[in-house]
Amino acid sequence: MAATHSHDFVLTLRCPDRPGIVHAVSGFLVEQTGNISQSQQYGDVETGSFFLRVQFEVLGEQVTVEQLRGRFAPVAESFSMTWEMWDAGARYTTLIMVSRFGHCLNDLLFRWSSGALQIDIPAIVSNHRDFERLAASYDIPFHHIPVTPDNKPAAEQQLLELVDGLDVHLVVLARYMQVLSDDTCRALSGKAINIHHSFLPSFKGARPYHQAHQRGVKLIGATAHYVTSDLDEGPIVEQDVARVDHSFTPDQLVAAGRDVESQVLSRAVRWHGETRVMLNGTKTVVFR
């Protein structure tokens, strides 16, 4: 008896909600000898949009993702789908940007090195040299791109050339403390994730945790979101909070905040890397 082969794929789609979508997708998978291992769906009554994520294996036939895409295209066209299909093991090529706060970078590098994130990291970019040795310890090329008011357009052009040259699928702003221009935000639309504390808009500017301490806050948190030209207002991927009390010093608030920021960003990167996040206008659908 011949050995049975299988290969896992992920299909994500968005389309106008109407009867027959799940039936059509399921019928396609049956035709491909596909077996569904995960399936999540959501119908947004406000926008009339339908979202679906299906992970499946193809039994028997040795088929490529390119072949499956070609076969699925007529089904997608008949339902006006916006869709993607990937090998389930495909790794997002991810460029990480950082300035002088390294907690999120360090956390991402450890999770990546331990296999917890489905990404590859071909480069780390910074406007300072503080984490050059950290990058070297993971054998990741480090690109120092200084940013000043005079050279900012050239610096961003250098960044975008790096993104194109490395065929980057995702850019992670792991506490990168430079505001990207509108043009760069548009160029990275849907594929750049930022992290910031959740005190906004209450405590803006420098030393937000010290401002929060002065006001006696009881909750601190973090938000991971896609980058848009509206500063810190892009579609939210993940948020979390930690409870604090009157006994916390400003430094303890900072430490607690860094923990939350690291955890929230790593979850957002993991879900994006597993194609679990879909844009829904100014919001996201996250199939965790």
Image (cartoon, rainbow, N blue to C red):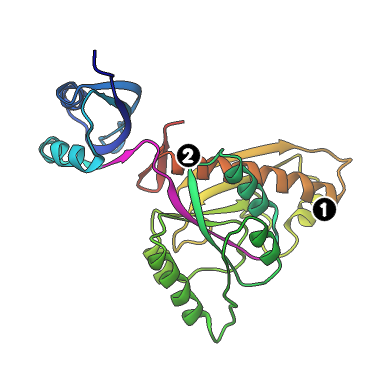
Residue assigned mark 2: 271
Q: Which residue is drawn at 48% across and 47% down?
A: 119
SS for tag 2?
A: helix
User: Could you classify mark 1 by the number of other residues whose Cα lies within 10 Å: few (under 14), some (14-19), or many (20 or more)?
Assistant: few
Q: Residue furthest bottom?
A: 150
C-alpha gap between disc 1 and disc 2: 35 Å
Neighbours of disc 2 within 10 Å: few (<14), some (14-19), many (20+): some
Q: Where is residue 255 in the image (x, y as percent from the top left)?
A: 78, 48
Viewer-proximal residue among 41 and 2: 2
User: What are the residue bounds of the magenta stretch?
Assistant: 84-99
Residue 57: percent from left, percent from top:
30, 26
Q: Between tags 1 and 2, which lies in front?
A: 2
Amino acid carrying label 2: it is Trp
- Reply above or below: 213 against 158: above
- Which residue is painted at 60% across and 45% down in the image? 113
Main structural element of the magenta stretch: helix, strand or loop? strand
Residue named by callout 1: 214
Kind of residue at badge 1: Gln
The answer to whether the residues at label 1 and label 2 have Cβ atoms under 8 Å apart is no
Q: Residue furthest top?
A: 1
Residue 161, located in which quarter of the rendered image? bottom left
Q: Please indicate, yes or no, whether residue 221 appears anywhere in the rendered image.
A: no
Judge whether 161 appears above or below 39 on screen: below
Residue at position x 18%, y 40% from top?
A: 67
Q: Is residue 145 found left or right of 47 in the rendered image? A: right
Whether residue 164 is visible here, answered yes or no, is yes
What's the residue at 48%, 54% (across, down)? 94
Q: Place residue 20 in its image quadrant.
A: top left
Badge 1 or badge 2: first in the primary sequence = 1
